[in-house]
Image (cartoon, grey):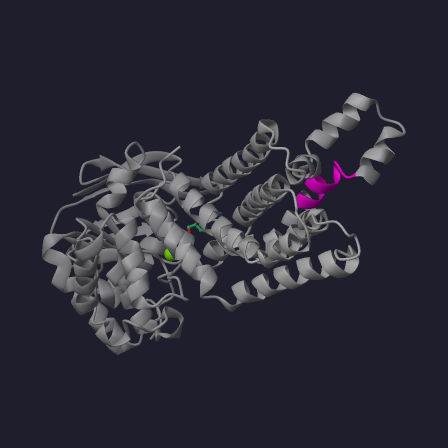
Amino acid sequence: MTCFSGPAWAVYKREVRAYITSPVAYVFMVVFLVLTAFLTFSVSNFYENNQADLRSFFMWHPWVYLILVPAAAMRLWAEERRTGTIELLLTLPITLNQAILGKFFAAWTFLAAALALTFPIVITTCYLGAPDGGAIVGGYLGSLLLSGAYLAVGMLTSAMTRNQVISFVLSVVIGFFLLIAGWPPVTGMLAHWAPLWLVDGVAAFSFMAHFDSLQRGVLDLRDLAYFASVIVFMLFTAHVVLENRRAA
Amino acid sequence: MLEVRDLHKRFGPIHAVRGVSFKVERGEVLGFLGPNGAGKSTTMRMITGFLPPSAGTALVNGHDIVGDTLAAKREIGYLPENSPVYGEMTVLQFLRFVAEVRGFKGVARDARVEHAITQCHLEQVRLQAIETLSKGYKQRTGLAQAILHDPAVLIMDEPTDGLDPNQKQVVRAMIREMALQKVIVLSTHILEEVDAICARVIVIAHGQIVANGTPAELKARSPSGRLEDVFHTLTLGDEPVRKVG
Ligand SMILES: Nc1ncnc2c1ncn2[C@@H]1O[C@H](COP(=O)(O)OP(=O)(O)O)[C@@H](O)[C@H]1O
Ligand SMILES: [Mg+2]
C-alpha cells in the first residue's frame, strides 16, 4: 500500500471540502442527529429506563448508518464517472490506492464529525448518573468502526456505477445482509434447522455481534480486526473494480 | 518526445484501436484527425495512462506509460474530451488541487497556479465556481490544469469542440504560443483546425492510421488539393463518395 501523503492528502482535502460546502452534508448531519435522538429518547425511552448508560443510544446506530452512510458515500466515485472527472483524476500522477484512501478517509472524517456532534448525550448521561466510561468509549469506537465498514461498502458500490441511486440501493442491500446475519431474530430462526457452527459462522460475519461487544465496553482485538478486515476487503474490491472498469 | 508503439485496445468484441504507432518531436503540433468513433479518444486515453492498452505501449519523454506509469504521467498534461472539471470548485481551488496532486506546495504551488491563470486568461473568473462559467472559460480552466506543471507533452482531446468561433481563435492562439517548447498532440474532426495549427497530421479511421504527413502533403494526394476530399477518401474507404455541389 502507498503512504498517505502528497497526492492522497490533496484528494483528502478536496473531498472534505466537497462535503462541507454541499448542502447535502447539512441535511445529512441534521437527519443523523434528529433520527438518533428520536430513536433514543422516544422509541427506547432513554429517561424511563432509569439507567445511566448509552445502550439505548448506540443500539440504533447500525440501523441509522444502514440508510445514511450509503447516502453519504454514493457520490464518491459515481459522480466522478458521471461527470468524467475520473479521467482527469486518474491521469494525474496519483496511484489508485492514494485516490481511494484519500476519498475514504475524507468521507470517514465527515461521518466522525457527525458522530462527534452527538456528545451532548454523553453530558446528559453523566448528569443523570455515573455511566461506565469504558462502555462509552467502546460505544463510540464501535460506532466509528461500524460507520467505516458501511462506508467501505458504499465506496465499493459507488465504484461500480455512474448512477448514484444504484450505488445507494446496492449498498443498503449489502449492508442489510451484513447487519441482519447476526441479528437475534435471524440467528434464532436459523438455529431451528441449521447446525450451531453454521449459525455461529454466519453470525461472526455480521456487524452486529462485533458492534455489540464493543458497546458493552469490551475492547477485543478480534472485533477491531473484524472491522479492519471488512474495510480493507471492500476497499481492495473497489480497487479491482476501478482498475478494470475505468471507462464504463 | 512522444513515441507510440503499436497500441491496441479491445473492448470485448470491439477492436477499437488496431496497432497505432507514431513519433512526435518537441516543437511539433500533431493533429489527430478522424471521424467520430475512429479511436482518437481511446488512443489518447492509453497514452495518458487512463486506459491500459490491450497491447503495445507509449514512451513519454522516455518513460514507459505501462511500466513506469507515474513517471510518465508527470511528463504529461492532458485535457480530456469535454474538459471534465469539478464544477462545485472555484477556478482557484481547482487549480490548487491539481497543483497539489502534482506535488507543488506553498509558494511554488501558488506561483504555478497564478502563472496558469495568466496564461489562460482566467483572471476575471478565478473565484467563480466552475459550473457557473461559460463553455469557453470552462475549456480554458481545463487547459490551465493541463499546462500548470509546464509538461513536456501536452495532449488535448478536441480542445475547441463546442466553442464559438471567437473562443476557438483564443484557444488556438494559446496552443500556437506553447508549440515551440512542447510535444503537442490534439485530436479534432474539424479540418480547418488542422490547417490552422498542426505541423503534421495523422488520419485515423476504424482504429488504424491511414495517413501521416504534413497538411500540404495530404492535400497533394487529391486532385482538388482540398483536405476535405482527402479526408473523405481516406476515412470512407471503398464506400462511394457523392460529391456535393
Ligand atoms: N468504454 C468503452 N467500451 C466499449 N466501447 C468503447 C468504449 N470506449 C470507446 N468505445 C468504442 O471504441 C470506438 C472508438 O471510440 P473513440 O476512441 O471514443 O472514438 P473517437 O474519439 O475517435 O470519436 C468506438 O466504436 C466506441 O464505441
Ligand atoms: Mg473522441
Question: Would you place residue B97 above or below residue A243 in this image?
Answer: below
In the image shown, does B73 or B59 lie closer to the viewer?
B73
Q: Position of residue A12 (x, y in %)?
A: 39, 50
Residue name at image x 66 percent, y 53 percent: A125
The answer to whether residue B4 is visible is no
* The N terminus of chain A, quarter of image: top left
Residue A171 image point, x, y percent: 63, 48
A102 or B6: which is nearer to us? A102
Q: Looking at the image, in which quadrant does ligand 2 appear?
A: bottom left
**Does residue A155 appear left or right of residue B141 in this picture?**
right
Q: Is residue A88 magenta?
A: no
Residue at the spot 85% in from the left edge and 34% down from the top edge:
A188
Q: Position of residue B19 (x, y in %)?
A: 33, 38
Span of residues in magenta: A175-183
Residue A43 appears in the picture as rendered: yes
Question: Is A121 placed above or below A93 here?
Answer: below
Q: Give the side of residue A116 with respect to residue B67, left or right.
A: right
**Residue A178 included in the magenta stretch of the image:** yes
Residue located at (77% from left, 54% from top): A44
| Secondary structure mostly taken by the magenta-highlighted segment of the chain | helix
Q: Nearer the viewer, residue B190 or B87?
A: B87
Q: Is residue A65 left or right of residue B171?
A: right
Residue drawn where x is 33% and y is 73% of the image: B128
Looking at the image, how many numbered discs can be counted on the residues?
0
Image coordinates of residue A19 in percent, x first then y, are 47, 60
Going by the image, does A176 lie left or right of B228?
right
Residue A246 in which image quadrant = top left
